[in-house]
């Protein structure tokens, strides 16, 4: 966003429709990704403390007394959403992106999230260890993408249309 990379997002597959991850990879509505902006935040330390125990793929650790709500901003009612692709190769277009407007707080010593950079795509048994860093593709063309907002704003000078959903009014902007 504005030429900046934001390294933290949460990937969820549509398990109510697709039994396994691989099936969801083949469908337009297979995934939802929530992206959050990061600022100062103390509660994140509990998560950061447990990450070394699950550094390798397939590892499991007991994790108690943690409220995942602290990973979301205080006000979740304001966000942008659009259909798109994964940010990692193969950039498959099966994702509904949800980008929170308000930031999540991160403490100053967490700002570089170095513990996240120690995580691996590989298991302990794998000969070659592959870090889970810089695993993103360059910005992709918008291809006429429609972005919706749950709040009123003037994002770009573009045609804006109001569309109704069950519970919210969204502003829709066609991005070229």
Image: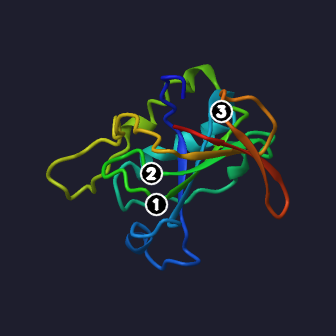
Residue 158's tag is 3
Residue 44 x, y percent position in the rendering = 63, 38
In whole angstroms, how far apart are the C-alphas of marks 2 and 1? 6 Å
Residue 116's tag is none
Query: Can you tell which of label 3 and label 1 is closer to the viewer?
Result: 3
In whole angstroms, how far apart are the C-alphas of marks 3 and 1? 25 Å
Q: Is disc 3 placed on a helix, strand or loop?
A: loop
Residue placed under numbered mark 1 in the picture: 94
Q: Earlier in the sequence, mark 3 or mark 2?
A: 2
10 in relation to 152, above or below: below
In whole angstroms, how far apart are the C-alphas of marks 3 and 2? 23 Å
Q: Earlier in the sequence, mark 2 or mark 1?
A: 2
Q: Earlier in the sequence, mark 3 or mark 1?
A: 1
Quadrant where the image shows the N terminus: top right
Residue 58 visible to an observer of this rendering: yes
Residue 174 x, y percent position in the rendering = 61, 42
């Amino acid at each position: 966003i504005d030429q900046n990379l934001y390294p933290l997002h949460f990937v969820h597959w549509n398990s109510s429709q697709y039994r396994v991850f691989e099936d969801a990879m083949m469908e337009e509505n297979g995934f939802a990704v929530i992206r959050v902006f990061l600022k100062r935040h103390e509660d994140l330390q509990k998560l950061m403390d447990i990450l070394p125990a699950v550094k390798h793929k397939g590892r499991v650790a007991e994790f108690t007394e943690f409220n995942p709500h602290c990973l979301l901003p205080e006000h979740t009612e304001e966000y942008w959403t659009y259909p798109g692709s994964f940010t990692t190769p193969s950039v498959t277009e099966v994702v509904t992106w949800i980008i929170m407007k308000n930031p999540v707080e991160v403490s100053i010593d967490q700002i570089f999230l170095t513990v996240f950079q120690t995580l691996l795509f590989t298991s302990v048994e794998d000969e070659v260890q592959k870090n889970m860093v810089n695993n993103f593709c360059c910005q992709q063309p918008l291809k006429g993408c429609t972005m919706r907002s749950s709040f009123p704003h003037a994002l770009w000078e573009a045609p804006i249309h109001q569309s109704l959903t069950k519970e919210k009014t969204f502003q829709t902007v066609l991005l070229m």
